Image (tube, grey):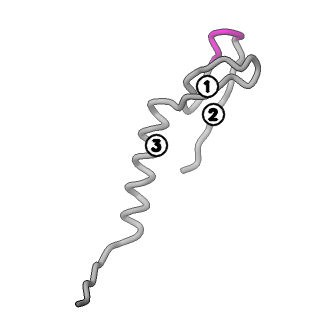
Amino acid sequence: MSIKINFDSKDIEKMIRNQANKALEKGVDGTCPNCGKPLTIKTGKTYCSHCKTTMNFTSNI
């Protein structure tokens, strides 16, 4: 028995990129590199509420 499946790998890649970008818009849990306190990192500028360190996060997905 043989099954043939046609799919476009570009469509799958596009779906993965879209989901990853949506996750980054919500933010990613991380820690401040200066004081080590937990924070949510979002694309663009993120400020630590504990030590006021400014971080600029960019993504290339």
Q: Secondary structure at mark 2?
A: strand
Amino acid at the residue labelled 2:
Phe
Task: Determine the secondary structure under disc 3.
Answer: helix
Tag 3 residue? 21
Residue ID at (29%, 78%): 6
Give the residue furthest to the right: 34
- Residue at the bottom extreme? 1
Which disc number belongs to residue 57?
2
Q: Nearer the viewer, residue 59 or 29?
A: 29
Q: Amino acid at mark 3?
A: Asn
Q: Residue at x 76, y 20 (%)?
A: 34
The residue under the point 43% across, 61% down is: 13
Identify the image quadrant of residue 33.
top right
- Tell me, yes or no, whether the highlighted magenta stretch contains residue 46: no
Q: Position of residue 21 (x, y in %)?
A: 46, 43
- Residue 49 part of the magenta segment: yes
Residue type, label 1: Lys
Q: Which mark is residue 45?
A: 1
| x and y, in percent, of residue 53 in the image | 72, 17
Quarter holding the N terminus? bottom left
Q: Residues at badges 2 and 1 in contact (C-beta under 8 Å)?
A: yes
Q: Which residues are magenta?
A: 47-51
* Relative height, residue 49 to residue 38 (above, below): above
Q: Quadrant of residue 14?
A: bottom left
Place of residue 46 in the rendered image (x, y in percent of width and height, measured from the top left): 61, 23
